[in-house]
Amino acid sequence: MKDVRKINCDGVITSRRKIANNIYHIKIELEERFPIFAYGNFVMVHLKDYMNVLLPRPFSIFRAKNKILELVFKEVGTGTKMIATSILPFNVRVWGPLGNSFPFGKDMLCVAGGLGLIPLYQSIIKRNFKEVFVGFKNIYEAYFVKSLQKRGVIISSDDGSLGERGFVTEIFYQYLKRTNFKGKVVSCGPIGFLKRLWEIEREVGNIETYGSFEKHMACGFGVCLGCAMETPWGFVKVCSDGPVFRLKDVFGE
Amino acid sequence: MKDVRKINCDGVITSRRKIANNIYHIKIELEERFPIFAYGNFVMVHLKDYMNVLLPRPFSIFRAKNKILELVFKEVGTGTKMIATSILPFNVRVWGPLGNSFPFGKDMLCVAGGLGLIPLYQSIIKRNFKEVFVGFKNIYEAYFVKSLQKRGVIISSDDGSLGERGFVTEIFYQYLKRTNFKGKVVSCGPIGFLKRLWEIEREVGNIETYGSFEKHMACGFGVCLGCAMETPWGFVKVCSDGPVFRLKDVFGE
Amino acid sequence: MSLKVRIGNLELKNPFMPASGTFGSGLEYEDFGNLSELGAIVTKGVSLNPKIGNKPPRICELPGGMLNSIGLENIGIEKFVKVLDELGKYETNVIVNFFGNSLEEYIEVAKILDGHNVVSCLEMNISCPNIKEGGMCFGTDPNMVYTLVKEVKKNIQKDLWVKLTPNAGNLISIARSAEDAGASAIVIANTYTGMKVDVATKRPVLGNIFGGYSGPVIKPITLYHVFCCAKEINVPIIACGGIVTLEDALEYFIVGASAVQVGTANFTNPHILWELIKKMESYLRAENTSLSDLVGSLKI
Amino acid sequence: MSLKVRIGNLELKNPFMPASGTFGSGLEYEDFGNLSELGAIVTKGVSLNPKIGNKPPRICELPGGMLNSIGLENIGIEKFVKVLDELGKYETNVIVNFFGNSLEEYIEVAKILDGHNVVSCLEMNISCPNIKEGGMCFGTDPNMVYTLVKEVKKNIQKDLWVKLTPNAGNLISIARSAEDAGASAIVIANTYTGMKVDVATKRPVLGNIFGGYSGPVIKPITLYHVFCCAKEINVPIIACGGIVTLEDALEYFIVGASAVQVGTANFTNPHILWELIKKMESYLRAENTSLSDLVGSLKI
Ligand SMILES: Cc1cc2nc3c(=O)[nH]c(=O)nc-3n(C[C@H](O)[C@H](O)[C@H](O)COP(=O)(O)OP(=O)(O)OC[C@H]3O[C@@H](n4cnc5c(N)ncnc54)[C@H](O)[C@@H]3O)c2cc1C
Ligand SMILES: Cc1cc2nc3c(=O)[nH]c(=O)nc-3n(C[C@H](O)[C@H](O)[C@H](O)COP(=O)(O)OP(=O)(O)OC[C@H]3O[C@@H](n4cnc5c(N)ncnc54)[C@H](O)[C@@H]3O)c2cc1C
Ligand SMILES: Cc1cc2nc3c(=O)[nH]c(=O)nc-3n(C[C@H](O)[C@H](O)[C@H](O)COP(=O)(O)O)c2cc1C
Ligand SMILES: Cc1cc2nc3c(=O)[nH]c(=O)nc-3n(C[C@H](O)[C@H](O)[C@H](O)COP(=O)(O)O)c2cc1C
Ligand code: FES
Ligand code: FES
């Protein structure tokens, strides 16, 4: 990403919309134009006015146009709770785009679980994939459903309250077995989800699965070494070597 | 104050009204009935949900009835800013009544400067004094003016924008010289104001001036020894030996 | 699921007590709860002669912590003994925190306290300057600590707890000295020396220039000290530093503390000790575990 | 109203620089500001051999501070020398932070750095275990510090700054040892060892059990150390600990620091050093004063 310009500027959260249980879509008005970015890149967001929340938080870039940056996040802890509940306008500092991105190509598959949809959504909308699988826990945690359905996305939920019933990884697995697909798969979701995808790759062979990983971060661009992830070949930095890795390079023997 | 029952309970700020420049009147709905208190007593208020503001803040009891405690405060720093600007309802913890109180008696004079009016206001309203002098910086920082005027209070302002022009201490001084008043004077105001009142007492003689003092506090009831005030006779604890002292006992030689 | 804990010869009905200097003599808290329900009452540091304390301002609030430079103000042992009489009515342990400026002063106060029937046990504050030795803090030198504890212990019958200063750097050798010299428990720890400057006036905010830093912000450091000492020391450790919530106390138990002291948090909620005891009961019940199983249960 | 400051043989265009380990090699910050405008670039600690660092999780956020247990991960001096070549294009001082596990390792790295033309000066991190001496931290013993600094200094031409660990307790004797042994400046200080336990799992939050505590919460303690050492030490002191705002830096200057390093705050605002320099210029202009008048201007 060395050649992509990064910004680091103040911004103001000007709009916030609840789109599912504990999930929000926000717009940040930046002081500068947000640069060109790639799917999978993320930004660091610092809650300037809350000394309590010391470190910035990493969020995937959902969309960015001119000075408007859009993020989608789930309320899980102190920081996201503040963003979810404080009165707007709300001051932040943002830097990015950061990290590497998903591979690009023809006829790829896409598998997303829960919040994992966010970095992939715009690419899905642009119909960049041969087939897309999106799984939610249940209907209450699902978002952008209509728009996904319009694009022929295969939607599932763990409890069957929306779309097919079952884990999205298993629906994807059945598809692979049915179709004998060969090629690249991009994915994003919780760690258990990614591990299962790696098991599937090992079993079916012929596919190259890429996934986006999460680790606690302090800087977001390779200086603090805080986001180290263990792999069989040593540590990698999730923020600057990733967040997208070939699953084999993380879990591989 | 040993025989007065104290409470220590949670409460919720349910109403906030701006009554002058940076000055607010708030109502706290307590979980318990506020006990009997005396003029000059104060409470400690802790902003439970803001770890940033570690220590509780001392505030004079403006009025209390059943479970409703009323305070009047000025926005000066971190804590009061939060109380002045946060969305209601706002959670607090309150304990009190704390401290000693103003002497009680007939034919006393009362002198208050700015916020010093707060602990004395209810007593003024009850017409407990022979004559009352209240001074404000200017008309923008003045509050409860109509009600004071109705009770025949002598109001002044430093810049003449309201009532008589000049420092309230000097208007009081002129009164003393004119009337040759003998007896007790109760007062509350900034430290310079209290010092001037002591000079006046020394000059005119025949009066006993009591004033309410302020020091940074941690506990509010005599355990931390943080609110020590130097006097010619050693340290006193403003929270539990005071906050009301005879000026002679603080400034006297 | 009892909350009882034995510390040396003392039995505490629960492991929660105030930290010295943040609870007065205890009597000031009568309005806020039944003192008999506490594991112990720990009183403000007392010395042979009255001490007038430091010049104000004596406290300074910081985000998540505070500085104090009270200067160990106290009324002296003679007057304090009368306060002790009053504390006798409570059915809990009375731990008296004391200090001196010389070995002799320490011994003299200790003897008086040892002879008082209300005193359950003595807590020795060693974060004081040794005036005879050029003002170096007693608590930062393992040899001075050994001598001090040994000599005081020789002169008393009751249990002696030793409260360490965290400004010593490596607390293990200090704790070991105290243990070897006969301490029944080690209290970890007192405040961290710190300061704050008023940039506008270019003056220190505290009248005494510097003060002791306490409150939530010190917990990570004190927790580490407790963890290190718990592995090396055989007598019980009483943890003290930044406890506000039950979780804070649990962290200390898990790394090996047998009991805890709550300081600064008494100022932000005078009822906190009683609340922590209640929450601890619920926690142990919910987890179906006991205090003794919890102590030192860290998985590493 | 110049911001220039002389530290030993070095002239800094202003007294603001990053703290080692929070600024990478410096190159990672190219996107965020012109590195030539900084008083100096201070690079991540380097050792003779590459070091893989500690087991994750390596960071843990706390209110007002953070714990890190990076474990001095670095690519080793050989690869690092290539990064240094790249830094040569910036018109500012390049300070290289280094460490070792033995005296010999320290000397060997120091010699390599001394021979590199981009390096302006060496910053020695002494918060490391002395493997030969049973793993005791170099920086906590005045004698070890003296030997270490003396021996390294013998082998190099360039200025040597010594960065102290605050876990030593009394920093004055350590600082004096470093000064006597030839340090050109003393950097006060590194992180405070601390820990955090996950109560639900009963495990330490950090993979390495404990870590270094940094950020705003440590400032009161480090400020006190700087104040104490500034009175006793003749070489310049560079303060480091919890600086976020200009006020924080001013407090350090007022108690006697000649320059400051900003660490954790680089994570909360990658542009912070440039902003502090601008604010400092405005401050000195508004107050009509100079940096040298400010340094040590505490009124007591
Ligand atoms: C590259 C990347 C992209 C991400 N994109 C999104 C997104 O688009 N939408 C979204 O909702 N979430 C996203 N996350 C996760 C998001 O960063 C965390 O949910 C958030 O930091 C939690 O903050 P908190 O203060 O609410 O939680 P707390 O638990 O209170 O935070 C405490 C600390 O833990 C860290 N932390 C907690 N959970 C995570 C996590 N899952 N990943 C990394 N750090 C964590 C925080 O950053 C903070 O330092 C992303 C994470 C990464 C690494
Ligand atoms: C007995 C007593 C009664 C008071 N009654 C009132 C009242 O009725 N209305 C009102 O507006 N104010 C009153 N004050 C002053 C009030 O306590 C302070 O204005 C308030 O604490 C400031 O808090 P802050 O967080 O906004 O200020 P900050 O300056 O951010 O607070 C930092 C620290 O300084 C302390 N502090 C700051 N100013 C004062 C002060 N003047 N007195 C004591 N501590 C201070 C705070 O308590 C806190 O610990 C009273 C003070 C005392 C001692
Ligand atoms: C105002 C104040 C006064 C204190 N006085 C004493 C004292 O007299 N003796 C003592 O051993 N410790 C004293 N301490 C230290 C506390 O007992 C405790 O060790 C320290 O505050 C850390 O705990 P905390 O973070 O829970 O406050 C005092 C602390 C404060 C804040
Ligand atoms: C993630 C991280 C990595 C660090 N790495 C080093 C290092 O390699 N060498 C060193 O001397 N100090 C290192 N430090 C300590 C900092 O340089 C600094 O001394 C400390 O963080 C205190 O300053 P602060 O409060 O401004 O962060 C590191 C600190 C952090 C937070
Ligand atoms: S988050 Fe700092 S190196 Fe990855
Ligand atoms: S405020 Fe604690 S003794 Fe007065």
Image (cartoon, coloured by chain):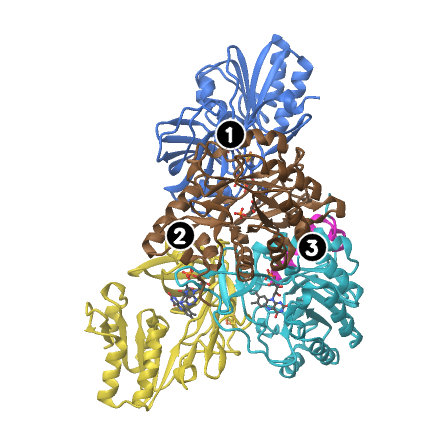
Chain colours: A blue, B yellow, C cyan, D brown
Rendered image quadrant of residue A108: top right
Q: Amino acid at mark 2?
A: Ser
Identify the chain of the residue marked 2, using the numbered disc in the image.
B
Q: Quadrant of the N terminus of chain C?
A: bottom right
SS of the residue at dot 2?
Answer: loop
Please, which chain is the residue tagged with disc 1 on? Answer: D
The amino acid beneath tag 3 is: Asn
* Same chain assignment for discs 1 and 2: no
User: Residue A215: x and y, percent?
Assistant: 58, 34
Nearest to the eye among marks 1 and 2: give it. Answer: 1
> Real-space Cα distance between discs 3 and 2?
55 Å
Disc number for residue D86: 1
Residue bearing the label numbered 3: D143
Few, some or many residues within 10 Å of mark 2 (<14, 14–19, 20+): few
Q: Are marks 3 and 2 on the same chain?
A: no
Quarter holding the C terminus of chain C?
top right
Q: Position of residue C210 (x, y in %)?
A: 53, 65
| SS category of the residue bearing label 1 | helix
Q: Are marks 1 and 2 in contact (CB under 8 Å)?
A: no
**Magenta-colored span:** C273-297
Q: Which residue is mark 2?
A: B86
Both marks 1 and 3 on one chain: yes
Ligand 4 lies under 8 Å from the Cβ of mark 3: no
Q: Chain of mark 3?
A: D
Tell me which secondary structure the magenta stretch mostly adopts.
helix
Q: Residues within 10 Å of mark 3 (few under 14, many from 20)?
A: some
Numbered circle sitting on residue A161:
none
Q: Is residue B175 left or right of residue C30?
A: left
How far, Cα to Cα, is label 1 from label 3?
37 Å
Instruction: Decide which of B55, A137 is in the foreground and name it.
Output: B55
